Image (cartoon, rainbow, N blue to C red):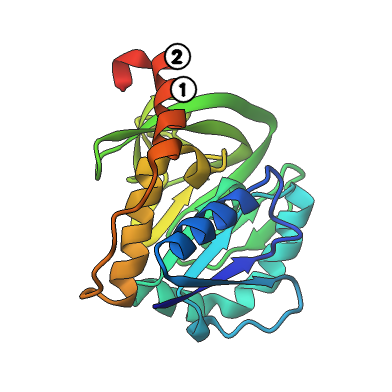
């Protein structure tokens, strides 16, 4: 099996080392005998959305986010079709904001988003910085990481993670993130796939099933990853392990 990963705006939306999500994903796919190719794209590159199986985009500064959304909007229809067709997306940090209707920056300027999900974003000069502990109900496991955000999503009900510690990102503080088909959008940084092996395992299975539901996936060797995760949970959040 071949998996083509489009790493979008790697030079502009990689503020917290979110390339770690790409690296850990490719590493484990390769170990499974799956040929994972990574293609990097940025502003003014021509991206044929139809060619790729997985799309990953990380977090950036407000200035870089402004540059990206002006370029990204040209792919609106193709991105929407890819999401509806079950292609896999991982959008972390403020890249989740690109998929709403509008983004109002901290100076009051408004940019149009892709409008794929029906929400608006307002940036504040107050920033939320904290470690987080969320729960992913699909697998009954905790998610660890951190938030560093100034954007607030309004008029949308999050549905990806249950908030245990941290901020939900809108008025409903009990939920965080967007999960629609194989689209995963979250403010969680970390990188999330490197720090959360149970979520990584689930994410890889989503990729394989989206490509070929009959593919016989080998067991994923995450022994060391899970040991590191369990050590953190035992030290900081033992009652949620």
Image position, residue 214 (x, y; %) = 20, 75
The residue where tag 1 is placed is: 232
Against 162, residue 53 (above or below) is below
Which image quadrant for residue 71? bottom right
Which image quadrant for residue 118? bottom left
Q: Nearer the viewer, residue 200 or 33?
A: 33
**Numbered label attached to residue 235:** 2
Q: Determine the residue located farthest toward the left in the rendered image.
A: 214
Element at label 2: helix
Residue 176: tell me if it is visible. Answer: no
Quarter of the N terminus within the rendering: bottom left
Q: Nearer the viewer, residue 58 or 157?
A: 58
The answer to whether 204 appears left or right of 55 in the picture is left
Residue 204: tell me if it is visible. Answer: yes
Image position, residue 107 (x, y; %) = 77, 44
The answer to whether 66 appears left or right of 130 in the picture is right
């Amino acid at each position: 099996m071949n998996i083509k990963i489009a790493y979008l705006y790697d030079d502009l939306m990689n503020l917290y080392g979110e390339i770690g999500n790409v690296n850990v994903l490719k590493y484990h796919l390769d170990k499974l005998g799956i040929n994972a190719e990574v293609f990097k794209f940025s502003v003014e590159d021509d991206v044929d959305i139809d060619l790729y199986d997985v799309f990953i985009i990380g977090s950036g500064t407000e200035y870089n986010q402004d540059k990206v959304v002006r370029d990204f909007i040209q792919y609106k229809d193709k991105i929407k079709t890819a999401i509806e067709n079950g292609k896999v997306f991982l959008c972390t940090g403020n890249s989740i904001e690109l998929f709403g209707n509008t983004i109002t920056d901290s100076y009051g300027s408004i940019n149009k988003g892709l409008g794929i999900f029906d929400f608006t974003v307002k940036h504040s000069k107050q920033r939320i910085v904290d470690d987080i502990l969320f729960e992913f109900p699909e697998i009954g496991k905790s998610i660890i990481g951190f938030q560093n955000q100034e954007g607030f999503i309004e008029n949308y009900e999050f549905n990806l993670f249950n908030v245990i510690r941290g901020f939900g990102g809108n008025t409903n503080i009990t939920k965080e993130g967007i999960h629609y088909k194989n689209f995963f959008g979250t403010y969680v940084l970390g990188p999330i796939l490197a720090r959360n092996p149970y979520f990584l395992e689930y994410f890889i299975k989503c990729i394989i099933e989206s490509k070929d539901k009959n593919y016989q996936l080998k067991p994923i060797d995450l022994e060391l990853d899970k040991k590191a995760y369990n050590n953190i949970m035992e030290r900081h959040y033992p009652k949620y392990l």
